[in-house]
Image (tube, rainbow, N blue to C red):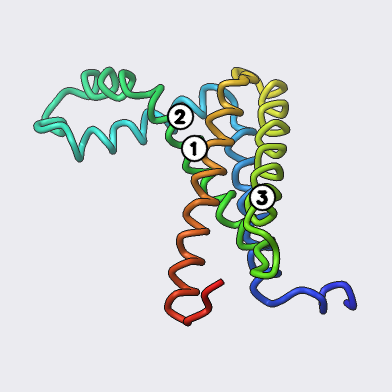
C-alpha cells in the first residue's frame, strides 16, 4: 500500500484503464482469422450503411462484397484507433508536469510500441492470424496519436487553470 500512496488517484485510474484496455486489445488479437474477418466485415457494412447511398437496399451478397472492398483500411484504422486509446491512457498514467515533455512522450511511446510488438507476436500463434511489422508501425503511430491527443488535452487543461510552464 505504501507504493500506491506515492501515486495520485489520476495515475492509478489511468493505469487501471490502460491495463484493462491492453486486455481488450489482447482479446481482439486472440480471435482467430475467421472471427476477426467477420468483425471487420460487420464494421465495414456499418460504415457503408452510413456513407454509401442505397447500401441498405442492396442484396446481402453485394453488401458483403462492398464491405470486403474496404476491409483492409477498416482493419488498419481499427489498429491505429485501439492503440491511440492505449497511448492516451499510458500518457495519462505517466504524465508529470515536473518532468520534461520528452519524458512525458517517450515513456508512453516506448511502452505502447513494446506492447504492439508483443501483440503481433501473440497473433503469430493465433490460427488464421499473422505477425506483421507493418502493423507494429501502424500501432505505434496510433500510440503517438493518442499521446498527442493527451498532450493537447493537458495543454488546454493547464491553460484553463492558468498553469503555464
Residue pointed to by mark 3:
108
Disc 1 secondary structure class: helix
In contact (CB < 8 Å): disc 1 and disc 2? yes
Give the number of the mark in front: 2 or 3: 3
Say which quarter of the image contains residue 31.
top right
Name the foreground residue: 155 vs 133. Answer: 155
Residue for point 56% across, 35% down: 139
Dot 2 or dot 3: first in sequence order is: 2
Residue pointed to by mark 1:
80
Crowding at dot 3, Cα within 10 Å, few <14 / some 14-19 / many 20+, comes out as many
Give the number of the mark in front: 3 or 1: 3
Kindly give the residue lying farthest to the right in the view shown. 2
Residue for point 65% across, 35% down: 116
Q: Quadrant of the N terminus?
A: bottom right
Residue for point 15% across, 30% down: 55
Disc 3 secondary structure class: helix
Q: Quadrant of the C terminus?
A: bottom right
Name the foreground residue: 133 vs 72. Answer: 133
Dot 3 or dot 1: first in sequence order is: 1
Say which quarter of the image contains residue 4.
bottom right
* Residue 154 rendering spot, x and y as whole percentages: 51, 66
Disc 2 secondary structure class: helix
Amino acid at each position: 500500500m505504501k507504493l500506491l500512496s506515492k501515486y495520485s488517484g489520476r495515475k492509478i485510474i489511468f493505469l487501471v484503464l490502460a491495463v484493462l484496455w491492453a486486455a481488450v486489445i489482447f482479446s481482439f488479437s486472440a480471435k482467430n482469422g475467421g472471427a476477426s474477418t467477420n468483425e471487420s466485415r460487420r464494421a465495414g457494412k456499418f460504415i457503408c450503411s452510413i456513407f454509401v447511398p442505397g447500401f441498405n437496399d442492396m442484396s446481402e451478397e453485394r453488401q458483403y462484397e462492398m464491405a470486403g472492398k474496404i476491409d483492409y483500411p477498416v482493419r488498419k484504422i481499427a489498429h491505429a484507433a485501439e492503440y491511440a486509446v492505449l497511448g492516451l491512457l499510458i500518457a495519462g498514467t505517466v504524465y508529470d508536469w515536473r518532468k520534461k515533455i520528452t519524458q512525458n512522450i517517450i515513456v508512453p511511446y516506448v511502452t505502447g510500441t513494446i506492447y504492439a510488438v508483443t501483440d503481433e507476436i501473440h497473433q503469430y500463434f493465433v490460427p488464421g492470424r499473422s505477425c506483421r511489422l507493418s502493423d507494429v508501425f501502424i500501432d505505434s503511430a496510433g500510440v503517438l496519436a493518442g499521446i498527442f491527443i493527451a498532450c493537447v488535452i493537458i495543454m488546454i487543461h493547464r491553460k484553463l487553470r492558468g498553469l503555464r510552464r
